[in-house]
Amino acid sequence: MNVDTALLDHPLKISECNALIAETLKTGFYNLALEGEISGFKPSSSGHFYFSLKDEKSKISAVMFKTRQYNLDFLPDNGDFVTVYGNIEVYVPYGTYQIVVDKMVRKGTGDLLAQIEKLKQYYQNLGYFDIKNKRIIPKYPKRLVVITASTGAAIRDILQITKRRAPGLDIIILPTLVQGEEAPNMIASRIKQADSFLLGDLIILGRGGGSPEDLACFSSPQVIEAMHNCEIPIISAVGHENDWVLSDYIASLRASTPSAAAELATQAYKEVSDKIEKSHFTISSTINAKLMNAQIKLKEAYSIESILKQKLNYAKFTLEKANKIEALLKGKLNKVELLLSYENENKIHTLEKKLTDAKTKIKSAKLLIQDKLNSKLKDYNQSLKEMKTYRSYQLTSIYKEKSNMLEKEKTKIESFNPYAIIKRGYSILKDEYGNIIKTTQTGLKSQVITAIVSDGKLMLKNIGDNK
């Protein structure tokens, strides 16, 4: 269709207009190379990539079909700055246009990776990555230095994890830029600052994930040299599991993420805390079980006391009944005495004898009942007193025994802490390689000796054997 003829002859239908635009773009915009930042990246279930390319003023839709991805050496993502090659095409039914990408290159990535690989070989040949140059990570660090951005997920995760696992650990934050041109010098300056002023006995250097360009400052010569000369051991925690920078190779220890670095730095504290918690739970459970058993036995004692009180009340009731019988007998005795006054002397004598016998029997019965009741009551009171005393002794003994066990466990656990020994006036000597000196023979091999005392380190010079 000729454009001029179509415009002059008759009004265009929408489909004709879109078809005309498609033809014009197809013939006029082909084999284009566009630069821009990827946004709205959405891989489809069929394997095609749908996204937009944008700059500071505009953006364009783009698609890269699965069949054109065979020479792609990276997985695109939002924020990647790329150069794409392809043709502009129009989707006629909707009148929208997009660039159909045949090739995509991440801008600058190839040169950057080649430069980092060259630096890696250089420092590897110098021995910077050798095991002998790595510092020993302290098992119980007293002060942790964190070198990272002052805001963001990295510092937040490190602070949360250390607070939960080692709440008593001192933390010094040295904020720094973690990307950009000024970042290498600033990071190196922070490492030197921590080392020169002995700000801590362990450093975490890191940041969250990012593009290779964002992480490149951690592979810079300034940072590598500062880490190599630093006497404080460093944990490198840059990016994610799949991100590797040169600081990971020279560090004393590499962590996959800042969170993992915080866990590694506080591992020993967490183990001690778990052991204390487990011991506390075991001892508390044992004491609670013993106390519960003692409470059951005390309840049984109270039950026995109640039974004894019931028996005592019954004895009192029996005694009252005996007193009533005695009163009844006295009444009858009075009647008999009244009758005897009218009887002859023999009958009176006989009745007096019977009366005397009855009195004697009544008195004996009363005394016997009273003695038995007093004896039973005394026995019951004594049994109750002994039982209460025994139960109270049992509870006191159990509590003292378990309290002593808890104190012993605490003392035993505290003895595992090497810094508790150092605080009593001892020190640990290490040679220039970080090895602990146990004898004078091994100490003579090192010119410089580090003495670890309760409040820091001392650098000593070896002047020889003094036998």
Image (cartoon, grey):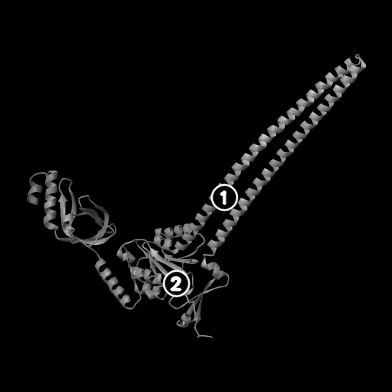
* Image location (x, y in percent) of residue 229: 41, 76
Residue 332, by quadrant, is top right
Q: Secondary structure at mark 1?
A: helix
Task: Pick the residue in front: 240 or 89.
Answer: 240
Amino acid under disc 1: Ile
Residue 388, by quadrant, is top right
Q: Is residue 434 above or below residue 101?
A: below
Q: Residue at x 29, y 75 (%)?
A: 121
Q: Residue at x 49, y 58 (%)?
A: 275
Residue 263, by quadrant, is bottom left
Amino acid under disc 2: Ile
Q: Secondary structure at mark 2?
A: loop
Return the disc, 2 or 1, that comes first in the chain's sequence.
2
Task: Pick the residue in front: 165 or 30.
Answer: 165
373 on left or right of 150: right
> In this figure, which residue is indicated by the disc labeled 2?
232
